[in-house]
């Protein structure tokens, strides 16, 4: 039995979630039920090497009175009173969720939506606008396109949850995938829309990207209603308003209309006989052009002037158009955070209105993804390395192309048989922006033995816990104060601070957007695992959505590779697996069962082949090397760690024997190398998936262990995959890295070169200490971790562009690695913290 609890408050919508299980405790094929009789649908998302279930996923439908917690047990699940029904016939997919029937038909998304047999919505489609030059060149004519669906795939067909995937393109560009999520008894569909940018940055400028739906309007104009959500309530209007008139229709009429109920006969003939003289408001627009403001306007029809409506700051991105006979609620999650966004209602005074959710507002300047500088004559590797020395940017002509980057949005459509109340709409807004999620407790997650080395907070180390909390809260505050929001930016953080200008180095080469550098994704997810905090989860969630989509190329030359930190997310010529690594996506996928994140990890099925395309070390190699499919150079830290994460994830999710063979085979090969991980790199044969084990040199990089290698090695060793020598190879690396040069020479015949990031590597010494029982290694780990005893605090700064709180000593590299070292050291060797003795023999590096 496993207790399920809500991440935030109980919610009444359908939800899906994941549950981990200890090795060997749940047999494959086990049926699950909820002990209170709530219908549940279950499936397996990962298995342990012995075939038992490692992660299961579950779904329940909406409930008027959801329980505060649930008990998940083995058993036969209850059947929903109104199961999701999926029918494939005549080229259509028809889904029934109770009173609502949905018809999917190519080339659009949804052909028709009916409530109790009456059509409410039709022709749900994706739309886009393109122009051939940027707005600063006065732009060009805008080409409008309705996207075409080429393929419809039913991925799940009930009884609680149905999932349908639709794939297509916007004319000749912008491939997309859309998943539609239906739950038994629900009147809404959750829409996850992902698109890949594949244009020519010099001539393709996306001027609008949206989802449109036509809404059937049957009621008299004064019984048709418009609702647009603001920060604290709604714009509440009727197409033909009966309030504020010179002649009073009566208090009951006015109250009834504002409440969205049907206005019957109007008792005052001075109003009833003059309805045709009251303007009918046909069109509405809410435009969120920045994180700080939206505008509202309306008009009576095309060709008529727009009337400004009092505007506001941050709209939650939800609207309704319809009447007392039915209508449509529509919205976009994180609306203001993903600006420029827009909500449109058109033709509300006609028989068919149109609602459009714009993911890129047509009011904004057209999307411009051109590279941000002209190259500054950096044509050769030598010149590019000079640039790296001064701005930290790894530039190379042609590599700063946005080809293949992606973005995912979450939208909602909800059909109604009458206009919903303000209370209902408020609930729908909340559900849109903080969708419900069931979880297990941190203690239960820890008991399952997933995600390697971590533990729960204790009262014994409140000083470290306070610092961990300080770091998280600082980044929450910096996101808000520095406005780290926007279509391409939301979810990421900045890399390094500029204390002179009192700003992050948003415009300095490789110091700007972080792009998972030194694993902030891991820091956030491990902090969530151990605390269960919803605010940490939401921050990590937004980062996962960003780094997995925007910072990675999903098609084209660099498919499967991510881009190193840069002023633009795709700008750096360092295209590497260390950014696209599955280790950053696995947490969100397993905790939520999110299929889109699963897609991103599936893209890495043959990730090792990317080393044929780009040699990560091409600019700094002392040797002559050209990528060879029979001898690909693979760095045993940054590179192999990402390969291992991809192979392990592929194996546990899909039972992929090729992935298992490559994972276990290369583990054996690393064990067979004379110096193991200290060898630095090895040559991989793509055909066999094995390393050449003849290399016997030593080459250590301070970066090798900072992109998930310790975390994935911890998991692999826990799996006990019967690979003799692998654990010893890893423990040797962990043990030797922080030893003195004299101790290293005594064992290896030479000291290790390039040692830095000692605090970060303290967790490696801690791991070796815990595995071997060596107290001196434990003391060494704590000495190298505990070098900073100053108070951590922020300082208010006045006179900057905006008032800010500054902690100029913080970098994202330092924050991420401090947090990971703290979390793992406290898990591995807490008992030795006050017994460290001596000093750290090397100084700590503030910047990698």
Image: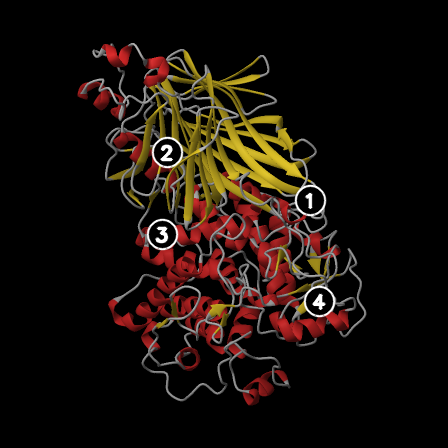
Q: Which of marks 3 and 2 is nearer the N terminus?
A: 2
Determine contact: label 4, label 1, CB under 8 Å: no
Q: In this view, does 716 lie to the left or right of 259?
A: right
Numbered disc 1: secondary structure: loop
| Residue 91 appears in the rendering | yes
Q: In this view, does 489 lie above or below 828?
A: above
- Check residue 228 in the rendering and tell me which mark sits there, or answer none: 2
Numbered disc 2: secondary structure: strand
Residue found at x 52% / y 46%? 652
Q: Residue 514, image x and y in percent?
A: 53, 62
Q: Which of marks 2 and 4 is nearer the N terminus?
A: 2
* Residue that label 1 marks: 133
Determine contact: label 2, label 1, CB under 8 Å: no
* Residue that label 4 marks: 617
Mark 1 burial class by Cα count in 10 Å: few <14, some 14-19, many 20+: many
As measured in the structure, the alpha-carbon distance from the residue carrying label 2 to the one carrying label 1 is: 33 Å
As measured in the structure, the alpha-carbon distance from the residue carrying label 4 to the one carrying label 1 is: 36 Å
Determine contact: label 2, label 4, CB under 8 Å: no
Q: Is residue 752 above or below residue 228?
A: below
- Front residue of 372/680: it is 372
Q: Residue 160, image x and y in percent?
A: 39, 27
As measured in the structure, the alpha-carbon distance from the residue carrying label 1 to the one carrying label 3 is: 52 Å
- Front residue of 740/326: it is 326
Mark 4 burial class by Cα count in 10 Å: few <14, some 14-19, many 20+: few
* Residue that label 3 marks: 445
Q: Residue 394, image x and y in percent?
A: 67, 66
As measured in the structure, the alpha-carbon distance from the residue carrying label 3 to the one carrying label 2 is: 40 Å
């Amino acid at each position: 039995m496993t207790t399920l609890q809500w991440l935030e408050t109980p919610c009444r919508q359908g939800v899906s979630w994941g549950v981990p299980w200890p090795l060997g405790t749940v047999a494959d094929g086990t049926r699950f039920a909820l002990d209170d009789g709530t219908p549940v649908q279950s499936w397996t998302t990962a298995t342990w090497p012995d075939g038992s279930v490692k992660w299961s996923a579950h779904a329940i439908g909406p409930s008027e009175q959801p329980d505060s917690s649930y008990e998940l047990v083995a058993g036969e699940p209850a059947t929903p009173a109104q199961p999701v029904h999926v029918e494939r016939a005549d080229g259509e997919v028809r889904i029934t969720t109770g009173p609502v029937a949905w018809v999917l038909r190519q080339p659009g998304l949804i052909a028709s939506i009916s409530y109790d047999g009456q059509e409410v919505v039709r022709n749900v489609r994706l739309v886009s606008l393109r122009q051939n030059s940027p707005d600063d060149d006065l732009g060009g004519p805008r080409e409008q396109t309705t996207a075409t669906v080429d393929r419809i795939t039913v991925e799940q067909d009930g009884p609680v949850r149905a999932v349908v995937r639709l794939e297509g393109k916007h004319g000749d560009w912008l491939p997309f995938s859309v998943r539609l999520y239906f739950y038994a008894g629900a009147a809404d569909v959750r829409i996850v829309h992902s698109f890949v940018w594949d244009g020519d940055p010099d001539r393709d400028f996306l001027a609008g990207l949206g989802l449109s739906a036509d809404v059937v309007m049957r009621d008299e104009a004064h019984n048709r209603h418009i609702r647009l959500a603001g920060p604290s309530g709604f714009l509440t209007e009727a197409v033909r308003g009966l309030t504020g008139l010179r002649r009073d229709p009566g208090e009951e009429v006015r109250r009834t209309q504002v409440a969205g109920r049907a206005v019957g006969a109007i008792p005052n003939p001075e109003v009833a006989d003059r309805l045709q003289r009251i303007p009918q408001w046909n069109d509405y627009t809410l435009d969120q052009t920045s994180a700080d403001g939206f505008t509202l306007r309306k008009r009576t029809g095309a060709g008529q002037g727009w009337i400004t409506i009092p505007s506001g700051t941050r709209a939650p991105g939800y609207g309704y158009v319809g009447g007392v006979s039915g209508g449509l609620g529509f919205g976009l999650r994180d609306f203001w955070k993903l600006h420029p966004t827009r909500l449109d209602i058109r033709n509300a005074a006609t028989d068919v209105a149109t609602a459009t959710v714009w993911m890129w507002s047509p009011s904004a300047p057209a999307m411009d993804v051109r590279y941000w500088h002209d190259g500054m004559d950096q044509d050769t590797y030598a010149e590019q390395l000079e640039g790296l020395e001064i701005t930290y940017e790894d530039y190379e002509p042609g590599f700063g192309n946005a080809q293949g980057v992606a973005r995912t949005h979450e939208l909602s459509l909800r059909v109604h048989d009458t206009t919903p109340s303000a209370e209902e709409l408020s609930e729908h807004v909340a559900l849109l922006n903080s969708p419900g999620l069931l979880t297990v407790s941190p203690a239960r997650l820890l008991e399952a033995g997933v995600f390697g080395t971590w533990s729960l907070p204790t009262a014994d180390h409140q000083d470290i816990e306070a610092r961990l909390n300080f770091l998280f809260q600082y980044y929450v505050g910096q996101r808000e104060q520095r406005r780290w929001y926007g279509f391409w930016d939301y979810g990421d953080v900045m890399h390094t601070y500029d204390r002179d200008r009192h700003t992050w180095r948003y415009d300095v080469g490789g110091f700007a957007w972080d792009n998972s550098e030194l694993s902030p994704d891991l820091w956030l997810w491990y902090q969530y695992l151990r605390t269960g905090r919803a605010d940490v989860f939401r921050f990590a969630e937004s980062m996962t959505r960003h780094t997995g989509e925007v910072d990675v190329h999903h098609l084209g030359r660099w498919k499967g590779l991510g881009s190193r930190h840069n002023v633009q997310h795709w700008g750096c010529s360092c295209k590497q697996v260390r950014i696209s690594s599955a280790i950053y996506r696995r947490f969100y996928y397993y905790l939520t069962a999110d299929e889109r994140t699963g897609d991103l990890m599936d893209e890495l099925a043959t990730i090792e082949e990317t080393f044929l395309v780009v040699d990560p070390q091409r600019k700094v190699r002392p040797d002559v090397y050209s990528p060879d499919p029979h001898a690909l150079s693979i760095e045993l830290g940054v590179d192999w760690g990402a390969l291992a994460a991809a192979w392990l994830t592929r194996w546990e999710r899909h039972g992929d024997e090729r992935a298992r063979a490559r994972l276990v085979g290369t583990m054996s090969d690393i064990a067979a190398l004379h110096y193991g991980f200290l060898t630095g790199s090895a040559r991989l044969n793509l055909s066999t998936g094995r390393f050449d084990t003849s290399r016997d040199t030593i080459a250590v990089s301070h970066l090798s262990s900072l992109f998930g290698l310790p975390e994935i090695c911890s998991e692999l060793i826990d799996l006990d995959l019967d690979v003799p020598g692998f654990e010893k190879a890893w423990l040797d690396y962990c043990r030797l890295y922080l030893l003195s040069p004299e101790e290293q020479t005594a064992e290896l015949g030479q000291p290790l070169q390039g040692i830095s990031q000692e605090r970060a590597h303290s967790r490696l010494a801690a791991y070796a200490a815990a595995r071997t029982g060596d107290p001196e290694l434990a003391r060494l780990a704590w000495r190298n971790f505990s070098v900073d005893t100053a108070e951590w605090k922020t300082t208010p700064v006045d006179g900057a562009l905006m008032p800010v709180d500054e902690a100029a000593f913080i970098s994202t590299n330092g924050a991420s690695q401090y947090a990971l070292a703290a979390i793992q050291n406290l898990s591995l060797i807490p008992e030795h913290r006050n017994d460290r003795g001596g000093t750290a023999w090397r100084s700590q590096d503030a910047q990698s």
